[in-house]
Image: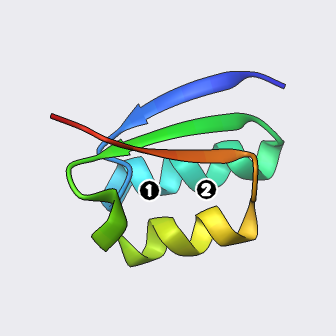
Amino acid sequence: MKSVLITGANRGLGLELTRQYLERGDQVFAASRQPEGATDLQALSQQYPGQLVTLPWM
């Protein structure tokens, strides 16, 4: 298992990369400006507990 940091993980390419790394079994640190308001990112967090860590960026 690798650890990956993705910025801009709440939408677009960042969100898709987050999904793909999680599906591979990697641990993902997903940074976005407002992670608590990123509904898709929060759904992934519930789907992959302990594997996805959301972080505020900036």
The residue pinned by badge 2 equals 19
Please give the name of the residue rendered at 67% of the width and 42% of the height, measured from the top-left corner: 21
Q: CA distance from mark 2 to mark 1?
A: 6 Å
Q: Position of residue 49 (x, y in %)?
A: 75, 58
Say which of 8 and 33 sits in front.
33
53 relative to 42, above or below: above
Please give the name of the residue rendered at 34% of the width and 58% of the height, measured from the top-left corner: 35
Residues at marks 2 and 1 touching, judged by CB atoms closer than 8 Å: yes
Q: Position of residue 20 (x, y in %)?
A: 65, 50
Location of the N terminus by quadrant is top right
Q: Say left or right for 51 vs 12.
A: right
Please give the name of the residue rendered at 76% of the width and 48% of the height, measured from the top-left corner: 50
Q: Position of residue 5 (x, y in %)?
A: 49, 28
Q: Label 2's element?
A: helix
33 relative to 36, above or below: above
The residue pinned by badge 1 equals 15
Q: Say left or right for 42 vs 48.
A: left
Please identify the quarter of the rendering in which residue 28 is found. Answer: top right
Say how many tags the image has. 2
Please identify the quarter of the rendering in which residue 34 is found. Answer: bottom left
49 relative to 29, above or below: below
Q: Amino acid at mark 1?
A: Leu
Please give the name of the residue rendered at 64% of the width and 48% of the height, measured from the top-left corner: 52
Residue 44 badge: none
Colour scheme shown: rainbow
